[in-house]
Amino acid sequence: MESTPLRLFCLAASAELGAGISAALSQPLAAHEEREFEDGEHKARPLDAVNGADVYIVQSLHSGPLQSTNDKLCRLLFFIGALKDAGATRVTAVTPYLCYARKDRRTKPNDPVTTRYIAGMFESVGTDCVVTLEVHNPVAFENAFRCRTVALTGTPLFVDYVKKAFAGDKLAVISPDAGGMKRAELLREALEASLGRPVGKGLAEKHRSAGVVSGDLFVGDVAGTTALIVDDLISTGNTLLRAARSARKAGAKRVIALVTHGLFMPDAAEVIADPAIDQVVVTDAVPAFRLDNPAKNKKLVILPAAALLAETIRRLHEERSLSDLLVF
């Protein structure tokens, strides 16, 4: 859309990420107002003109530290509606962490399928495209929305990091459960193509029921390797730790976790400290605010996601292909 002006907004809850995207895109953030009212209600409105513009709005929909998931979602939806009312030609929601993405199917009788309801909310305010990073289930995400969706992955960031940090090692990529096998295979194939040599694979299967994780099946040849456990998010870290211990038992000499979203709920710090795990690599799409002194945590590596998101915005605006960004 070369003849259509680009406008980049970022709501206050994701200000740091928005600033990084703005710098990487060489596109200043458009001005907007966010106002709080005494009764807890709020409003947001664009201050720069958006009539006829191709608009991108950044808001990562994780909980905390100052606003809940629902607060952030509500503010984003209202702002998208205001942009459309103000004449924006196209509005793209850039939500690196998409809330409720894990509730994509019924696991109990009469369960909600919340991902589908979230899609309906975005569509109801006129959203033209939703961009997210390492959504929990890409197929469910794409099927839930009728508007355009872009499911980015952390693979390009992780490939670059592994090449710099462990290029000389014998490598194996491990999925911590059967549901993540496609994600793990995408990373393994990308590493093989980039390094020009074989990369092994493994699977640490688990079973979850009523929040309880069980099972210790491990399949794969990881003896003598730097084992790379890849996942979309780390919450308490129990799934990651089970996979790491299984890989160690199978002979891995080193275990590195490559996890796009570090939620780091209570007890996650103890999991990271466990000797079975040598390093945890996450992106800054969700700030590591729940950890004490994350910058001083020697096991934690935080990769900036701004350049990947900025390049995605650039290509969407210019209507260019995203295929080499390894989208699902």
Image (tube, rainbow, N blue to C red):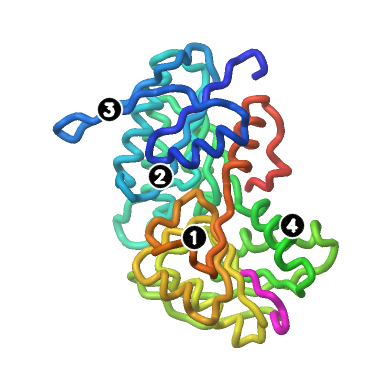
The type of residue carrying mark 3 is Arg
Answer with the quarter of the image where residue 116 lies.
Answer: top left
Q: Position of residue 253 (x, y in %)?
A: 67, 82
The magenta-colored residue range is 222-228
Which callout, 4 or 2, points at the residue further toward the start of the chain? 2
Per the image, label 1 sits on a secondary structure element best described as: helix
**Camera-nearest label, 3 or 2:** 3
- Give the Cα distance between marks 4 and 1: 29 Å
- Give the Cα distance between marks 3 and 2: 19 Å
Front one among 135 and 115: 135
Compared across the picture, whether 306 is left or right of 168 comes to left
Per the image, label 4 sits on a secondary structure element best described as: helix
Circle on res. 61: 2
The type of residue carrying mark 1 is Ala
Residue named by callout 3: 35
- Give the Cα distance between marks 4 and 3: 45 Å
The residue that appears at 61% across and 75% down in the rendered structure is 255
